[in-house]
Amino acid sequence: MSDLASSRPVPDEPPDPRPGGPSDVSGLFPSASELYVPAAREPSDLDELALSPLAEVIADLADLRTESGGSPFAADAGPDDAEPTAQSIAALLSSPATRPAELADAVAWCYDDTALPLLLPLARHPDAGVRRAVAQALPSVLGEAAADDTVHALILLSADRDDDVRDWACFALGTQLSEIDSATVRGALAARLDDPHDDTRCEALLGLARRRDTRVLPVLRERLARDNVFSLEIDAAGALGHASLHTLVRGHLSGWDDDVVARVCAALRLTDPDGVGDDLLDGLADWFRAGAPHATDEDRYWWAVTLQLLEHAEYRAPEIAEQVHYRLQAAEPATGLMLGSRLSQLAGDHGWPRWRPNY
């Protein structure tokens, strides 16, 4: 039994695509046999592909540093394990001696949101390692910027010929940026449902399930009917939460590594036609009565189970919150703790009227 449990690093609705604008990605959803890949080029021939869009940004960064009296790339003078910054990446891009692997390593571990304008053009870099690093980094450097250019770049990368690039792009679109929902994003993920690369296909499936796109239901029924399934397919069943998948999920309860078992059990609860379980709801009520979040580790168990459920199906928060609230029977201070909790906040985000932000 294969397990695709992810240890990858762990966002706003973009405007509707404008024809010809940065979110207009019509035609970027090829079949598996027509995957996009940039044409191979020599590093010196990146002028139109990557360096031209970067030149002005690099110059601006240099101006900012020199105006303050320092070297434009003084950030590079730090220790080798220093976190990559916009300045250090700009220095790499401006140096003809920079190797693609060196650039890819810096990009992959960049969390500086001022580097976003530098990274976006690199989605078309000729080296697959750099493109993979861009797919990995973009959600981390999005910051408060409008999401449409980032989404456009990730959609482009989701159709890359390199397996790892597609995998990371679908992970970014499907899970890391799961709050961004549009027909364009869904179309890009749906185009990968028959991807020949298992990880890519499963990340796309999970991304659509998180958005409760019903196109994944027949796909999940077919996948879960097999003898061997991937853990991300189980996650997707939990995220969709359709009761018709419950028996299929139950058929895959054994054989998992310890770190996957909790996720499989969560999917079983989320697909249960009778709800998430009285044991969970009673346990959560006891958790708040015990003084959450200052309860004992033993009491914390049910809170941990709840967090696992909400990891893939946050929209179930109102259902859980309402039933826990009922069990508390307005008892103070437990009710106060519950109404001011993360559970209630998530429920409020999904329309639960009882949440009191300032309780």
Image (spheres, rainbow, N blue to C red):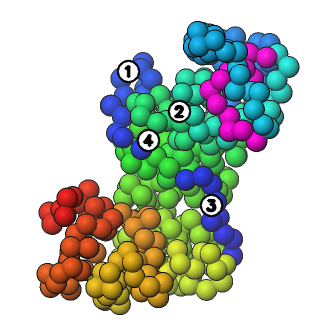
Range shown magenta: 81-95
Answer above or below: position of 75 versus 355.
above
Badge 3 is on which residue? 6
Q: Nearer the viewer, residue 337 or 211?
A: 337
- Using a 10 Å C-alpha cutoff, classify the residue at mark 3 as few (fewer than 14 neighbours), some (14 to 19) or many (20 or more): few
Q: Which mark is residue 19?
A: 1
Query: Given this view, does label 2 or label 1 mark the residue nearer the observer?
Result: 2
State the residue at coordinates (76%, 42%).
81
Pointers 3 and 4 in contact (C-beta within 8 Å):
no
Q: Nearer the viewer, mark 3 or mark 2?
A: 2
Q: Quadrant of the C terminus?
A: bottom left
Identify the mark nearer the N-term, 2 or 1.
Answer: 1
Label located before the other in sequence (3 or 2): 3
Amino acid type at circle 2 is Asp
Q: Main secondary structure of the magenta part?
A: helix
Q: Earlier in the sequence, mark 4 or mark 1?
A: 1
Label 2: few (<14), some (14–19) or many (≥20) C-alpha neighbours in 10 Å: many
- What residue sits 54% from the left and 27% below the top? 114
Corner quadrant of residue 301:
bottom left
Q: Is residue 251 left or right of residue 106?
A: left
Mark identifier at residue 185 = 4
Measured as percent of width and height from the top left, residue 328 is found at 20, 84
